[in-house]
């Protein structure tokens, strides 16, 4: 049943989250579950990138760019989202964090971004890949705006994971078994991807990234991290 629901949403739902869904998603993004995840991703970014220009694709309420800016004062961060309401929320969150001078948010379609070629040192995206109707279009657009030698890190929840793995990764970590399973099953119904789908995308001959690797998230989440390298 969940698989059929997922396929229906992928076919008919918009790539962005329309109002008023933006407000309910923002509440979820503020949860301990998601805020912990954003902090972990931001810490990974801060270890490898202390300076430069970073783009967050599908930024939602902007929590990831804000966390990156806190941990890496030398970087400039831009977050984009196709939803104007999401961008409005993200800008308000940056103001509350007193980071508006270093974190910018823009309404952009990731399929056709307004940025010049080779604009960014790092491009990140968390939980947005499953929304992309034509993921290769977005991946190749990311390639275009990424600098030579730059990297793109794409994170998304894995749908093809057993409940035993979820309990191990989340339940024994901090959230408890029952809460972990409820959260995971609620999110994966429409916000997830399989390893097979990722491999099909990366192995497509139209993919401009010829160097890439897939990593399991090293923390507590059943998340795939796709590391794309532009040579």
Image: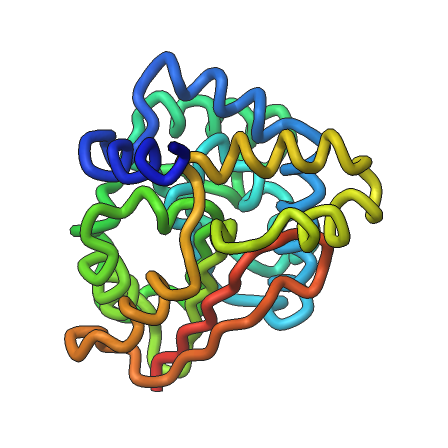
Coordinates of residue 219 in the picture (x, y in percent): 72, 59
Foreground residue, 49 or 230?
Answer: 230
Residue at position x 54%, y 45% from top?
Answer: 65
Foreground residue, 205 or 111?
Answer: 205
Q: Is residue 8 left or right of residue 6?
A: left
Q: Is residue 107 visible?
A: no
Q: Is residue 126 left or right of residue 85?
A: right
Coordinates of residue 83 in the picture (x, y in percent): 30, 29
Q: Is residue 82 above or below residue 45?
A: above
Q: Is residue 151 above or below residue 223?
A: below
**Quarter holding residue 98:** top right
Coordinates of residue 2 in the picture (x, y in percent): 41, 34
**Quarter holding residue 128:** top left
Residue at position x 83%, y 41% from top?
Answer: 174
Residue at position x 70%, y 51% from top?
Answer: 164
- Residue that lies at the very extreme toward the top in this rendered image: 20
Residue at position x 57%, y 20% from top?
Answer: 27
Foreground residue, 128 or 5?
Answer: 5
Q: Quadrant of the N terminus?
A: top left
Q: Is residue 56 visible?
A: yes
Q: Quadrant of the C terminus?
A: bottom left
**Quarter holding residue 43:** bottom right
């Amino acid at each position: 049943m969940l698989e059929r629901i997922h396929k229906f949403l992928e076919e008919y739902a918009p790539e962005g989250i329309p109002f008023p869904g933006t407000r309910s998603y923002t509440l979820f993004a503020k949860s301990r579950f998601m805020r912990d995840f954003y902090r972990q991703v931001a810490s990974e970014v801060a270890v490898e990138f202390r300076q430069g220009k970073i783009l967050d694709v599908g930024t939602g309420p902007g929590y990831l760019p804000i966390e990156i800016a806190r941990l890496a004062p030398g970087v400039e961060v831009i977050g984009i989202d196709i939803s104007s309401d999401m961008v409005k929320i993200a800008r308000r969150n940056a103001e509350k964090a007193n980071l508006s001078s270093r974190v910018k948010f823009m309404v952009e379609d990731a399929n056709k971004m307004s940025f010049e070629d080779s604009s960014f040192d790092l491009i990140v995206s968390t939980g947005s890949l499953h929304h992309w109707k034509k993921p290769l279009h977005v991946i190749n657009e990311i390639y275009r705006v990424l600098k030579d030698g730059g990297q793109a890190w794409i994170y998304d929840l894995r749908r093809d994971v057993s409940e035993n793995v979820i309990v191990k990764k989340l339940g024994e970590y901090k959230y408890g078994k029952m809460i972990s399973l409820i959260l995971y099953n609620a999110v994966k119904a429409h916000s997830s991807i399989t390893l097979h789908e990722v491999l099909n995308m990366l192995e497509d001959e139209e993919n401009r990234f010829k160097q890439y690797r897939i990593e399991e998230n090293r923390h507590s989440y059943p998340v795939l991290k796709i590391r794309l390298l532009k040579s």
